[in-house]
Image: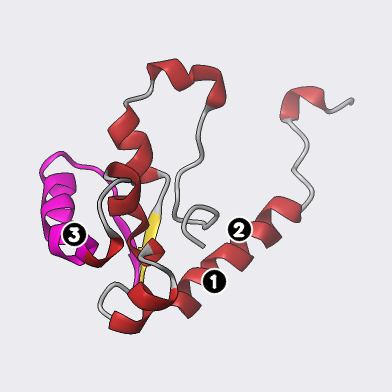
Amino acid sequence: VNHWTTEAGMTDFMNISQTNWGILQVENSCNFGTGLWYWCILSGGLNFQIEHHLFPGYIHTRLPEIQHIVKDTCKEFGLKYTHFPDFWTAIKSNIQLLYDLGQEEPEEEHLKKE
């Protein structure tokens, strides 16, 4: 639920070398339930996925302390910082993305035969 949601970005692997590593970490990750102490314990801090990706060696119990810094920095630089209020909202977005990906893609206009 931290990466596969309708809100998380999709990585363009064809141009990955042209992508800023930090921006990629922020815009392709989502947080959930960061205000709920039990999610930090149950998920081992993975509910702070954005901070975890930016600072992978940082102990998960300290991630809440740097969240506001990361969030403010994202706002300052115009980066999308995705946060779901709880796990259930995140899983709903995950299920919606899986549903969307399973739908038949519309035919491209230039491929249609007349």
Counting residues from the N terminus, which is met first, the one under dot 1 or under dot 3? 3
76 or 40: nearer the viewer: 40
Classify mark 3: helix, strand or loop: helix
Counting residues from the N terminus, which is met first, the one under dot 3 or under dot 2? 3
Position of residue 41 relative to residue 62, above or below, is below
Q: Which residues are magenta?
A: 62-84
Q: Amino acid at mark 2?
A: Leu
Residue 80 is covered by the magenta coloring:
yes
Classify mark 2: helix, strand or loop: helix
* SS majority, magenta: helix
User: Is residue 85 shown to the viewer in this render?
Assistant: no
62 or 97: nearer the viewer: 62
Which residue is labeled 2 in the image? 97
Query: Residue at the spot x=54%, y=71% of the render?
Result: 91
Counting from the top left corner in percent of width and height, residue 90 is at 47, 69
Q: CA distance from mark 3 to mark 2?
A: 26 Å
Q: Amino acid at mark 1?
A: Ile
Counting residues from the N terminus, which is met first, the one under dot 2 or under dot 1? 1
Query: Residue at the spot x=14%, y=63% of the render?
Result: 65
Q: Are marks 3 and 2 in contact (CB under 8 Å)?
A: no
Query: Residue at the spot x=81%, y=24% of the render?
Result: 111
Classify mark 1: helix, strand or loop: helix
Which residue is labeled 1 in the image? 91
Label 2 crowding class (10 Å Cα cut-off): few <14, some 14-19, many 20+? some
